[in-house]
Image: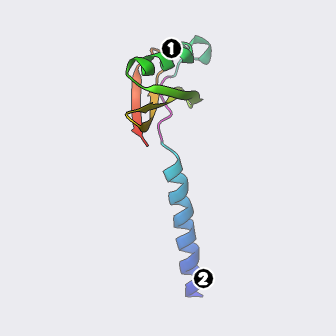
Amino acid sequence: MNVIRVVAIALTIGIGAGSTAMADGFKDCTKLDKASWKPASEAEAKAKALGYEVRRSKIEGSCYEVYGVKEGKLYELFYSPEDLSLKHTIAK
């Protein structure tokens, strides 16, 4: 019975850690209504101006998430759609 309990706990911890690892946790950039957001293409242009080769972009929570490559490394850049300020960067 104890073996089953230990295995169940280990699986629960493993599943929780896996889902946490997949989420980057950065999704709050603005409280502004989407109708007032600046275009995503402007966030991409800002990333390009910083030297990133933009691969794609998407909306993540209330942020523009721009995927770019710089010096051979992949980055996720999170921009506020309100003022297009860079809020967070994750190197992959």
Q: Give the range drawn in magenta.
A: 25-30
Q: For this rendering, which residue is in front, 51 or 64?
A: 51
Quadrant of the frame with the N terminus: bottom right
Q: How crowded is mark 2: few (under 14 residues within 10 Å), some or many (20 or more)?
A: few
* Residue 42 tag number: 1
Q: Note whether 81 is above or below 72 in the view shown.
A: above
Going 54% across and 12% down the picture, which residue do you hit?
Answer: 38
Q: Residue 82: x and y, percent?
A: 49, 16
What's the amino acid at mark 1? Glu
Element type where label 2 sits in the image? helix
Cα separation between marks 1 and 2: 54 Å
Q: Relative to 87, is 66 on the left or the right?
A: right
Q: Can residue 64 be seen in this view?
A: no
Q: What residue sits right under mark 2 in the picture?
A: 4
Q: For this rendering, which residue is in front, 77 or 27?
A: 77
What's the amino acid at mark 2? Ile
Q: Is residue 13 visible?
A: yes
Element type where label 1 sits in the image? helix
